[in-house]
Image: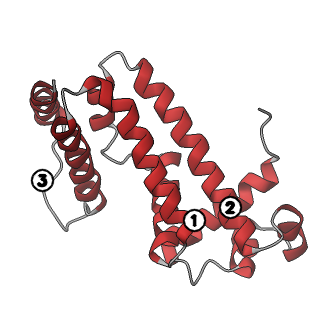
Amino acid sequence: MSRPPRARESVLDAFEATLISSGGRAATMDATARAAGVSKGGLLYHFASKDALEAGLLERLAALVDEDLERIAAAPEGAIGYFLRTSVMDDDPLDRVIIAVSRLAQGGSSAAVAALRDMRHRWQDALRPHTRDAAALDLVMLVSDGLYFNNALEGGVLTDAVPEGPALDRLVALVESAAR
């Protein structure tokens, strides 16, 4: 698969950043063009409409989830350990696109809701062989959700809510033990 042109990626980066910082209503075509440093014509060359921009962001999410699934399968520490450790947000491309697509879903985009649901189902499918049953899979997913949510609230809202270092190691070991 060839890489998309950098200008197209810059426009998607700008759209994603605007969604994250200001929400769906503020992520207009004009605001995206300004944030990307391109003319409206330059934006329209790559994305003819806001729907096309949203579709591009959903394609980005799917591609990054594909990469994440490959890392889950190849993780030396095991699928569950990798998945839980990476549930602590690191402001990486996957984290950013998940937040941006979540903003679209919050704004009523059924395509964004479907993309987030598909992402979760794909993660569950990757983790299912590493868990003993459906309840164990639910445990892994819900602990991941909690790590992600609490990390998103960091910055003074919840102090010490996200374990780090040895505390995260113990949590991962406990979940892995319970899930097998």
Residue at horizontal 89%, vertical 64%? 45
Q: Nearer the viewer, residue 150 or 111?
A: 111
Pointer 2 and pointer 1: residues touching (CB < 8 Å)? yes
> Which residue is labeled 3 in the image?
160
State the image coordinates of residue 55 (x, y, percent, origin top left): 68, 61
Left or right of 138 in this view: 92: right
- Residue count near mark 2 (Cα–Cα under 10 Å), binned few <14, some 14–19, many ≥20: some
> Which residue is labeled 1 in the image?
111
* Nearest to N terminus: mark 2 or mark 1: 2
> Which residue is labeled 2 in the image?
55
* Nearest to N terminus: mark 1 or mark 3: 1
When the figure is inspected, residue 172 is found, relative to residue 114, above or below; the finding is: above
Quarter of the C terminus within the rendering:
top left
State the image coordinates of residue 56 (x, y, percent, origin top left): 69, 57
State the image coordinates of residue 64 (x, y, percent, origin top left): 56, 41
Marks 1 and 3, how far apart in space? 35 Å
Q: Give the structural element (helix, strand or loop) at label 2.
A: helix
Q: Nearer the viewer, residue 169 or 102?
A: 102
- Residue count near mark 3 (Cα–Cα under 10 Å), binned few <14, some 14–19, many ≥20: few
When the figure is inspected, residue 81 is found, relative to residue 15, above or below; the finding is: above
Q: Give the structural element (helix, strand or loop) at label 3.
A: loop
Q: In which image quadrant can residue 78 be found?
A: top left
At label 1, the amino acid type is Ala
* Nearest to N terminus: mark 2 or mark 3: 2
For this orientation, the residue located farthest to the top is: 76
At label 3, the amino acid type is Asp
Left or right of 121 in this view: 70: right
When the figure is inspected, residue 145 is found, relative to residue 135, above or below; the finding is: below
Residue at horizontal 71%, vertical 71%? 51
Quarter of the N terminus within the rendering:
top right
Q: In which image quadrant can residue 57 be found?
A: bottom right
